[in-house]
Image (cartoon, helix red, strand yellow):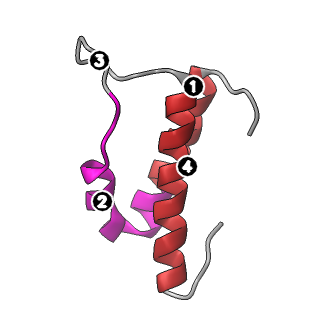
Amino acid sequence: MGNKTALEWTEEIRKIKEEIKAKYPELAKDIKEMPVTLKADGSPDNDPRHMKTYFESLQGLLNDFAISHESPVI
C-alpha cells in the first residue's frame, strides 16, 4: 500500500470498518474507542500518513481478534 491519497485511504478505512462490523460486530465498540487524530479546528486529520496509521491500527485490531479466536482473517 504505497503512496495512497487521502481519498484512497478513506475508502480502505471504510472497507475494513464494514468488514469488522459485518463479521465481528463485537469489535464495533473497540472501533469507537480508538483515537482519531483531529486538527486544531476539530476536523478529522486527512493527512494520508495519519490515515495509513489508523488503517493499520484497524488491521491490527482485526488480526489480533482473529488470532485470539483461532481464525486469521487477513
Q: CA distance from mark 4 to mark 2?
A: 14 Å
Q: Indicate the amino acid at tag 1.
A: Pro
Q: Secondary structure at mark 3?
A: loop
Q: Secondary structure at mark 4?
A: helix
Q: Is residue 72 left or right of residue 47?
A: right
Residue 18 versus residue 52 in the image, above or below:
below
Q: Indicate the amino acid at tag 2.
A: Asp
Residue at image x 53%, y 44%?
A: 55
Q: CA distance from mark 2 to mark 1?
A: 22 Å
Q: Indicate the amino acid at tag 4.
A: Glu
Q: CA distance from mark 1 to mark 3?
A: 15 Å
Residue matched to label 2: 30
Residue at image x 40%, y 22%?
A: 45
Residue matched to label 4: 56
Q: Indicate the amino acid at tag 3.
A: Ser
Q: Position of residue 8 (x, y in %)?
A: 63, 28
Residue 22 versus residue 6 in the image, above or below:
below
Camera-near label (4 vs 2) is 4
